[in-house]
Image (cartoon, rainbow, N blue to C red):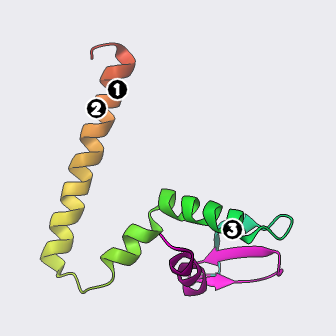
């Protein structure tokens, strides 16, 4: 992702309480991501923000909400995600028990 895209993502949902801090928040004002800019190194802060947003699935969510999703498609997607999570949990449990 380019710097402009990350800056767009920052401006998408940012509230700056302190010029040196970046808070990405939801509607309720609850802080989800907090990045500190150290030594005016904005590049490093953008990289850290991108990494955190990637881990939390923010980019996936933005991509998914780009277009309208029919309720039937939403149910099918949620069901597939639940199946994937359940399979992953079983796989991890089996690995921990030494069966795999």
| Quadrant in which residue 78 is drawn | bottom left
Work out whether mark 1 precedes mark 3 in sequence or the reverse, and give the earlier one: 3
In the image, is residue 19 part of the stretch drawn in magenta? yes
Residue that appears at 38% across and 68% down:
60
Q: Secondary structure at mark 1?
A: helix
Pointers 2 and 1 in contact (C-beta within 8 Å): yes
Residue that appears at 56% across and 65% down:
50
Residue 39: horizontal and vertical position, in percent?
86, 65
Q: Secondary structure at mark 2?
A: helix
**Residue tagged by mark 2?**
90
Location of residue 40 with respect to 86 vertically, above or below: below
**Residue tagged by mark 1?**
93
Report the span colored magenta.
1-28
Residue that appears at 19% across and 56% down:
80
Of the pair 48 and 100, the residue shown nearer to us: 48
User: Mark on residue 42?
Assistant: none
| Quadrant in which residue 98 is drawn | top left
Q: Is residue 80 left or right of residue 57?
A: left
**Residue tagged by mark 3?**
43
Residue that appears at 57% across and 60% down:
52
Pointers 2 and 3 in contact (C-beta within 8 Å): no
Work out whether mark 2 precedes mark 3 in sequence or the reverse, and give the earlier one: 3
Q: Is residue 18 left or right of residue 8?
A: right
Residue 46: horizontal and vertical position, in percent?
64, 68
Give the class, few, some or many, for how many residues have Cα within 10 Å of label 2's Cα (few <14, many ≥20): few
Q: Compute the Cα span from label 2 to label 1.
A: 5 Å
């Amino acid at each position: 992702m380019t710097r402009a895209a990350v800056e767009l993502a920052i401006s998408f949902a940012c509230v700056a309480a302190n010029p040196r801090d970046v808070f990405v928040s939801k509607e309720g004002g609850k802080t989800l991501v907090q990045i500190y800019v150290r030594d005016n190194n904005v590049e490093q802060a953008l990289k850290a923000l991108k990494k955190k947003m990637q881990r939390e699935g923010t980019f996936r969510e933005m991509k998914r909400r780009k277009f309208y999703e029919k309720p039937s498609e939403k149910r099918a997607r949620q069901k597939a995600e639940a199946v994937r999570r359940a399979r992953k949990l079983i796989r991890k449990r089996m690995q921990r028990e030494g069966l795999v």
